Amino acid sequence: MFELYLDTADIHQIIRYNACLPIRGITTNPSILARANTGLSEFLPKVTEVLGEQARIHVQVVTESTDAMCNEAFNLRKLPFDIVVKIPATETGLAAIKILKSQHIPVLATAIYSAQQGFLAALCGADYLAPYVNRIDTTGASGISVVADLQALIDRHQLPGKLLPASFKNTQQVFGALKAGVSAITIPAEIANELLTHPAVQPDVDSFNQNWRAVFGQTLPFES
């Protein structure tokens, strides 16, 4: 089943979009939490209050050595929430992913900039793979091409890892990732808003309502 995540630590935005979208959970990174000036002890209970106990929350480690990443992951998993540990897909990160998966800890390999890098993370057992679409674009490569190539490799070799692309700056990037057949996606609140709006929609709705009221006034259709 497809999984839709919000890439935010703004609880008001989580409340807003949970009302109209089937939000599976939340993705965070150290920068997102720092900008919101919120720690996990404050943030995680608020998320589950809004999304429910089944909410899945992706939390990134901030240590750099393999042992430290693993220790941080073990402690994150002790928290009473459904936490997926985000590990950068670096050499030390891949070593940590191998260890964590041997302990059956759910992992997202993050900071993926190439299909090869993501494929290696998948081979190490990562449950989720997060290519950075827009950040890849800024390097001169194509983020959507990386997503499509990585998805093709996952499919061809029948690996269980799910692509969870991140780093979107426009809806066309989102659409491109969806067309590539990914199993999950995470979007910031501003992109969620763009996906839900189109300049032609509200004028149409207003016209329909005005035409109805011109004939029937305040009578509702089921009363007519």
Image: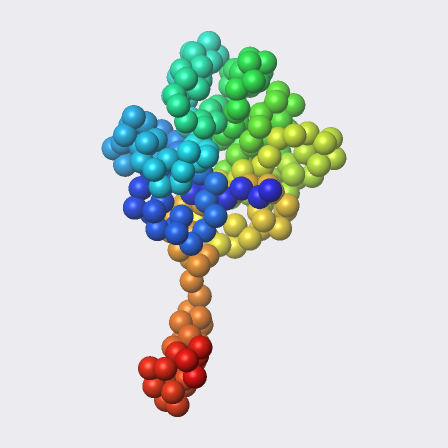
Counting from the top left corner in percent of width and height, residue 178 is at: 58, 49
Image position of 29 with respect to 92: above or below: below
Q: Is residue 38 above or below residue 77?
A: below
| Res. 120 image quadrant | top right
Residue found at the far front of this picture: 223
71 sits left or right of 172 in the view: left
Res 129 quadrant in image: top right
What residue is rendered at 48% in x and 41% in y? Answer: 24
Q: Is residue 24 above or below residue 159?
A: below
Label tally: 0
Quarter holding the C terminus? bottom left
Residue 146 in the image: x percent, y percent? Answer: 60, 40
What x and y, as percent, mark residue 97? 54, 18
Q: Please provide percent x and percent y for residue 63.
A: 39, 17
Q: In the figure, is residue 134 to the left or right of 45?
A: right
Q: What residue lies at 62% left-to-right and 26% top-to-bottom?
A: 122
Q: Quadrant of residue 153?
A: top right
- Tell me if residue 194 can be seen: yes
Between residues 11 and 134, which one lies in front from this camera angle? 11
Residue 136 seen: no
What residue appears at the point 53 percent right and 16 percent down from the top-left corner?
100
Residue depicted at 68% across the width and 29% down the height = 159
Query: Which residue is at the far left?
Result: 37
Q: Quadrant of the N terminus?
A: top right
